Image (spheres, grey):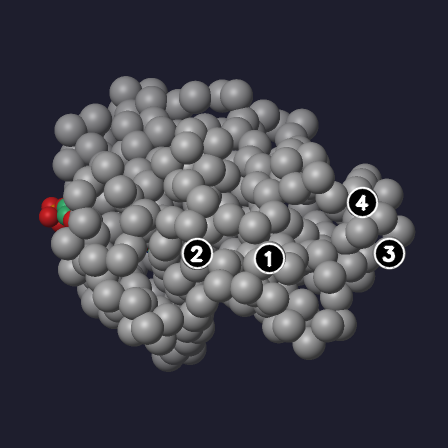
Amino acid sequence: MGVGVLGTGHYLPTKVVTNKDMEKLVDTTDEWIRTRTGIEERRFAEDDIDTSDMAFYAAKQALEEANVTVDEIDLILTATVTPDTPFPSVSCMIQERLGAKNAAALDVSAACSGFMYGMITAKQFIETNAYKKILVIGAEKLSKITNWEDRSTCVLLGDGAGAAVIGEVSEGKGILSFELGSNGAGGKELYQNEQDMLVMNGREVYKFAVRQMPESTMNVIDKAGLKKEDVDYLIPHQANIRIMEAARERLEISEDRMATTIKKYGNNSAASIPMALSEAAKEGKIKDNDIVVLVGFGGGLTWGAVALRWGK
Ligand code: UT7
């Protein structure tokens, strides 16, 4: 048996904020944001929508798509740096709202790599036969921790949530290989300060990401015994189109084979990858038996990647 994705879901806040709107908030231009980051617009959650609300909607859609009942869920793992409260966890809030009475619940803290950490943690529980079905969510309300006076970060971020039900799939399908890593010495480059705001040394994170993302992508392909020509679709963390392009160019795949939700949603931290995965699956960009690589990096510093064969 393999371990893979049984269904996906995502939630997008309705409030669309364009680069032109950002020009009214800080000293920036649509041109600067587009050319330096690839972002055209982002979504911000309304005041009465918190991270757990977005997580809940994404989770419900993933369960429906997977055709899995709430009672079947053994564990809920929510990756977030913007929980409603430090405790109870978002996962416990989701457990209650879903009525998932058989589920354990735990939040995962690995910043933008959080969904990768969640997915790979889920895989271990299923492989050891401890659990059968695990709900992995990435959800962020980054607008809560955005410093609206810092033009170098506020233009990058957006809110949203994505989810996947992880469980047993046929032999040869599902997660073929993974990589996780961390470098705590780089923690000072991207963190939340005492005022609860996100602080980033963009250039240092950029240098790390532009090296790590292509490297992790190639590592999971090698570990799976694949060649780069085998990869059908790449879903990188949506932080900056230039960083994503570095991974795509290393793989030598065409532009239409890489998820670029960053244009519409900006950087959604732990939610970026599951949102892009759910959207790609729904739009038919990934098909049965396709080789898909998911790769993320973020605060910690942390990184994580998987190569998987799509389908059940
Ligand atoms: O998911 C978390 C991980 N985060 C990331 O991956 C982000 C990684 N870093 C980046 O994507 C890029 O470093 C940024 C998009 C944050 C910045 O792009 P950059 O090309 O590295 O620009 P920079 O920081 O070198 O700044 C260049 C100039 C500076 O002006 P001076 O000093 O050259 O006069 C900045 O002050 O751009 C200025 N600048 C802006 N100008 C207009 C910074 N932010 C803005 C802005 N609008 N929003």
User: Residue 20: x and y, percent?
Assistant: 28, 20
Residue 85 visible, this angle: no
Which of the 4 quarters of the picture holds residue 254? top left
Q: Quick one: SS at disc 4?
A: helix
Which of the 4 quarters of the picture holds residue 8? top right
Tell me the residue that label 2 is attached to.
309
For discs 2 and 3, the disc positioned in front in the rendered view: 2
The Cα–Cα distance between marks 3 and 1, rounded to whole angstroms, is: 21 Å
Residue at the (68%, 71%) spot, across then down: 125
Tell me the residue that label 1 is attached to.
169
Tell me the residue that label 3 is attached to.
102
Q: Which mark is residue 207?
A: none
Tell me the residue that label 4 is attached to.
70
Q: Quick one: SS at disc 3?
A: loop
Q: Quick one: SS at disc 2?
A: strand
The Cα–Cα distance between marks 4 and 1, rounded to whole angstroms, is: 19 Å
Q: Amino acid at mark 4?
A: Val
The Cα–Cα distance between marks 2 and 3, rounded to whole angstroms, is: 29 Å
Nearer the observer, 177 or 42 = 177
Q: Mark 2: is the Cβ under 8 angstroms from ligand 1?
A: no
For discs 3 and 1, the disc positioned in front in the rendered view: 1
From the viewer's perspective, is residue 15 above or below residue 135?
Answer: above
Which of the 4 quarters of the picture holds residue 283? top left
From the viewer's perspective, is residue 237 above or below residue 207?
Answer: above
Q: Residue furthest right?
A: 101
Q: Earlier in the sequence, mark 1 or mark 2?
A: 1
Badge 2: residue crowd in 10 Å (few <14, some 14–19, many ≥20)? many
The Cα–Cα distance between marks 3 and 4, rounded to whole angstroms, is: 8 Å
User: Residue 190: x and y, percent?
Assistant: 38, 61
Q: Quick one: SS at disc 1?
A: strand
Residue at the (56%, 50%) spot, across then down: 312
